[in-house]
Image (spheres, helix red, strand yellow):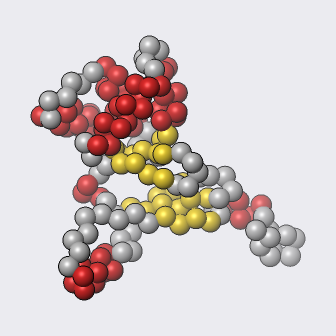
Amino acid sequence: MENTFNAICQKLHQLDYKVTPQRQVILRAFLENAAEHLSAEEVYNIVKERYPDIGLATVYRTLDLLAELDILQKINFGDGRTRYELDQHETHYHHHMICLGCGRVQEFDDDLLESLEKVLTRQTGFHITDHQLKFFGYCRECAAKNRDKSGNDVI
């Protein structure tokens, strides 16, 4: 984790951005919650505990900057909130399953689209640099809650 933090700070320095205490605490929030897809409000609640003087506007500005610099990736799961995760270029093939019942987001690492990307590039000449795949449905727990006594889905 510390290596990643230092690498991000170095990137900010190279791009002539200051590594302010606010930026540091926001970066650490993402590193410590790497499995989460955090909204600006969730980041604010996490960092407010360690840095009480930080404002929500500062969090929004910092998230926008970090996304612009490809340090964070913006994600929309259709719930009306922009969410963020660390952008990991070396592993861009992870996808999301979003539960419509409880809102839980599960990641899965499998490159389901690599062969499709190759075909599209070959056929169209379009150079694909990234993709996102999202599945919407019901997690095991929500699906189980929504079955009737005979085992039929009532969703």
Residue that lies at the very extreme toward the right in this rendered image: 149
In the rendered structure, the answer to whether residue 66 lies left or right of residue 103 reads left
Q: Quadrant of the N terminus?
A: top left
How many marks are shown on the rendered structure? Answer: 0
Vertical order, 126 against 85 (above or below): below
- What residue do we see at 80% from left, 76% from top? 152
Where is residue 121? Give x, y as percent: 24, 79
Where is residue 2? Give x, y as percent: 26, 33
- What residue do we see at 32% from left, 43% from top? 67
Vertical order, 148 against 21 (above or below): below
Pick the front one: 4 or 44: 44
- What residue do we see at 32% from left, 27% from top? 23
In the rendered structure, the answer to whether residue 100 lies left or right of residue 90 reads right
Residue that lies at the very extreme toward the top in this rendered image: 53
Q: Quadrant of the C terminus?
A: bottom right
Pick the front one: 50 or 3: 50
Whether residue 17 appears in this view of the structure is yes
Pick the front one: 1 or 155: 155
In the rendered structure, the answer to whether residue 47 lies left or right of residue 151 reads left
Whether residue 108 appears in this view of the structure is no
Residue that lies at the very extreme toward the left in this rendered image: 14
Q: Quadrant of residue 123?
A: bottom left
Where is residue 48? Give x, y as percent: 48, 21
- What residue do we see at 52% from left, 55% from top? 77
Pick the front one: 145 or 10: 10
Where is residue 57? Give x, y as percent: 44, 26
Vertical order, 64 against 78 (above or below): above
